Amino acid sequence: MSNPVLVNTLRGDVVENRHRGAIAVCDPSGRALHTWGDVDALVYPRSAIKTLQALPLIESGAAAHFALGDAELALACSSHNAETPHTETVRHWLETIGLDEDALECGAHPPLHEKTAQKMLLDKTEPGRIHNNCSGKHTGMLTTCRFLGEETHGYIEREHPAQQRWFDALGDMAGVDMRKLPWSRDGCGIPVIAMPLASIASAFARLTAPNDLPQARADAAERLTRAIAAQPFMVAGSGRLCTEIMQMTGRRVLVKTGADGVYTAALEDLQLGIALKIDDGTREAAEISLLAVLNQLGVLNDDELEALAERRRMPIRNTRGVLTGYRQPAEIWLDSTSG
Amino acid sequence: MSNPVLVNTLRGDVVENRHRGAIAVCDPSGRALHTWGDVDALVYPRSAIKTLQALPLIESGAAAHFALGDAELALACSSHNAETPHTETVRHWLETIGLDEDALECGAHPPLHEKTAQKMLLDKTEPGRIHNNCSGKHTGMLTTCRFLGEETHGYIEREHPAQQRWFDALGDMAGVDMRKLPWSRDGCGIPVIAMPLASIASAFARLTAPNDLPQARADAAERLTRAIAAQPFMVAGSGRLCTEIMQMTGRRVLVKTGADGVYTAALEDLQLGIALKIDDGTREAAEISLLAVLNQLGVLNDDELEALAERRRMPIRNTRGVLTGYRQPAEIWLDSTSG
């Protein structure tokens, strides 16, 4: 069966594009409280699980040893824009652990932030590995390797302890055996593992229930949550939805985007986790779906909903600046199913 | 019911993204010979109908009066890259009809051709209306207005004769009453009309059967077809699929892309028309679907199929240059339905 249409693009009164997908809203026990579409299907969470991938950085003692601050920890959980505060903080952090940009094994790509990318082009500066949106995550992995005295070369390989550590942490939080699931390579070179969507939502729900976690895990979750809420700019950057939401909500609504139409959220007040995937991989449809489900769960107040109005129903203008339509939640949001 | 999945994106062995859509393959009588999905649904054809929108430019006598060549006529049917040959030809053409860039009522946008856009940024040159991928279509409409002595200001408005003319031509070719169908604004400002997908395919099929058309229409179709086949670069540009296909096939396989996942084709040998729309609007999925249906209909020879191999099954590489998967035709192509 096909997943439901979650988002429509209207041109005039006619639906021009349709975006299907699945959403799981789970509690810390792993129970799916609300579902749209097939939440048992395997999806690649991509960058939406970076906070969970960063747990070993805290639990190993590496973050404390190198006295990492909120900015560095938020960057470890980021898909950053490569604006100057992002790249300069990563550069300094690499120095702190006795490495430099050459140690990063992610590839180079132009900054996600268009103005920064344009400025580099005008300055004839080539993008480096540090501009990769994942350079903070990679630096976090390198930090743990350095603290534990491991060989850093090849830290992106599946068998390297840097990868095995987050398989354990995420598998534990999600209630799955990561080593039995299909895997491939992510955009930045580390392994990416296809997981049931509901298990990803469950992992984020468990982040919100520290009392049910072993003390070291609860402390690590608390430390990362505090860092992200304190430094939401470092998690994404200018013009980015993750940053915009958490600048308003702080740790109350922690959200994280992933490539190809993924979003996750951890809702502190309700102790719920959300994971969603748009079938066709469209980012804007994932953003609108995230805001629709947050709205449906009642976790955004009126001021927040108002501030996010053009994110929730995106006006589309043509090259003349004329409004031609909207990207907006589909009819399904009027009567959601409960799982 | 939902349309079938036409294209999958694989990462490793797992399907990461799915693209649904509909395809109609029709003969000149309007009969649908092959269909995938709902071909009666209304879709905006966007730029995929530019050849049909250019019929009045020939039929009015305007093209002959201004002695337009193949390059100008191909540009009238183009979504061009705004590379120098495109913009310089449009600029000279505007002079020929006693106008300049200011007469264009499309909006400005950076060239579709990335290197040209980057060069303009480095040269600190602002994109103008002439760089709009539709500037050739607009100049064609202005040409007819000038020949007929019409007011050119406001030529993009629905009631202006410049628009009414192509409503008549396309409505006649497609067998629909264009004025009874829903409409909105296209990206460039002119009206865009939502049409049944099969009717769009029928219109292109009729282009391939000049003997069934009134003489003036048959002559216009022949003139535009010859121009496009002679100047495929002018229809799109460097790196573009439309140009690449027609540089190989000439008038045998005329193809045209439209925004938000549309493609059309006119197959001279088989006297068939094709129209397809990807539900979610993804361009690459439309390209792969077009090539899959062309392949299925047997209109590409072995050399052409080989030359287009990486267009038909697109390798995806990550930021390290490592192959992570493919965008490729879905399983449905193994057993297509016939309508």
Image (spheres, coloured by chain):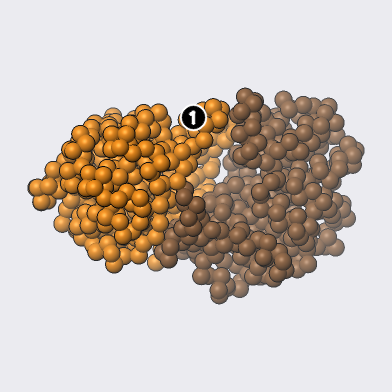
Chain colours: A brown, B orange
Compared with residue B126, is residue B30 higher up or lower down, i.e. above or below? below
User: Badge 1: how crowded within 10 Å, few (<14), some, or many (20+)?
Assistant: few
Number of disc labels: 1
Tell me, yes or no, if residue B227 can be seen here. no
Question: In front: A160, or B59?
Answer: B59
Horizontally, residue B283 falls left or right of residue B256, namely: right
Q: Position of residue B203 (x, y in %)?
A: 22, 53
**Residue located beneath label 1 in the image:** B115
Nearest the viewer among A199 and A37 is A37
For the point 69% across and 42% down, the residue is A80
Residue B119 visible in image:
yes
The residue located at (46%, 50%) in the rendering is A320
Name the residue furthest bottom.
Answer: A335
Q: Residue at x 28, y 34 (%)?
A: B96
Q: Residue at x 63, y 55 (%)?
A: A263
Q: Which is more toward the observer, A181 or A61?
A: A61
Residue A302 sits above or below residue A112 on the image: below
What is the quadrant of residue B113 in the picture? top left
Figure quadrant of residue A218: bottom right
Residue A126 location in percent, x, y?
63, 26
Q: Which chain carries label 1?
A: B
Q: Is mark 1 on a helix, strand or loop?
A: helix
Query: Residue B326 location in percent, x, y?
Result: 47, 40
Q: In this view, does B277 lie to the left or right of A322?
A: left
Mark 1 residue type:
Lys
Of the pair B199 and B1, the residue shown nearer to us: B199
Q: Residue A185, located in which quarter of the rendered image? A: top right
